[in-house]
Image (spheres, rainbow, N blue to C red):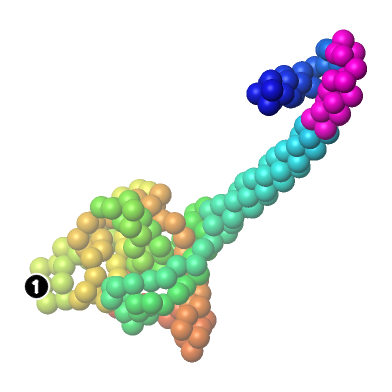
Amino acid sequence: MSTIWLFFVFFLRKLSGLGASASWLCSRLPGRFRSVAITVCLVVTWEVSIGGDMFRRVLGKTLGFLGYTVQYGCIAHCAFEYIGEFVACSGPSMEPTITSHDVVFSERLSRHLCRIEKGDIVIAKSPFDPHMNICKRVIGLEGDKICTSGPSDVFKTHQYVPKGHVWLEGDNLRNSTDSRSYGPVPYALIRGRVCLKLWPPHNFGALNQSPTGRIVKRSD
């Protein structure tokens, strides 16, 4: 008997979403089953209604959260791409101007407006590893004549910076892998210009001038 009753309730639950069909079935049942069937239909209809409202609320909140996430993600992407970013530096190539664990701010506007100048410190993609960034100083721009020989060399050698390229070197010439090793760097690899040192606090402010004296003064 209990099995038949469970099957009956299950059958009514399936019909509860059909509206008129469930009402017609209840009207055809014997009197002692009719009241029970109507009660079951009302309860099931209420359950489905509440469940649907809850589902809609959860779905609405979820979609709203996703919408805000996408919105703020786009804002953050545009800020990092066109305004600037914070960069934690590592390595000895820019000492003493920038040392390991220093935090600097790299702005992007100069790069997009083609306002990178000689003497600027830039963050660029490594010519050898696109997943690694390098921090170097711009020594020469396109058309500049760069001395590629060492200070003690008797015969001096020079190289011209081709169009669309820059010549990058570290301030620590003795411990820097830069354009002296891999040649001029395409301008498109520059990500931003370092304009401010943020950390450590006692060194907060603008960056020092090049200590090497190798910046090309004018184009030959």
Q: Amino acid at mark 1?
A: Val
Q: Quadrant of the N terminus?
A: top right
Q: Give the residue at the far left of this rendering.
A: 154
Q: Quadrant of the C terminus?
A: bottom left
Is the residue 39 above or below the residue 124 in the image?
above
Per the rendered image, the range of residues in magenta is 27-45
Is the residue 173 above or below the residue 70 in the image?
below
Secondary structure predominantly adopted by residues drawn in magenta: helix
Report how many numbered discs are placed on residues in the image.
Answer: 1
Residue at image mark 1: 154
Residue at 83 percent across and 32 percent down: it is 43
The answer to whether residue 156 is visible is: yes
Judged left or right of residue 138, residue 112 is right
Judged left or right of residue 138, residue 83 is right
Using the rendered view, name the quadrant where residue 13 is placed. Answer: top right
Give coordinates of residue 182: x percent, y percent.
Answer: 22, 56
Using the rendered view, name the quadrant where residue 143 is placed. Answer: bottom left
Is the residue 81 above or below the residue 29 in the image?
below
Q: Give the residue at the far bottom of this rendering.
A: 202
Judged left or right of residue 28, residue 182 is left
Residue at 64 percent across and 45 percent down: it is 66
Give coordinates of residue 70: x percent, y percent.
Answer: 62, 46
In the rendered image, residue 3 lying in the magenta stretch gets the answer no
Nearer to us in this view, 94 or 103? 103
Nearer to us in this view, 134 or 15? 15
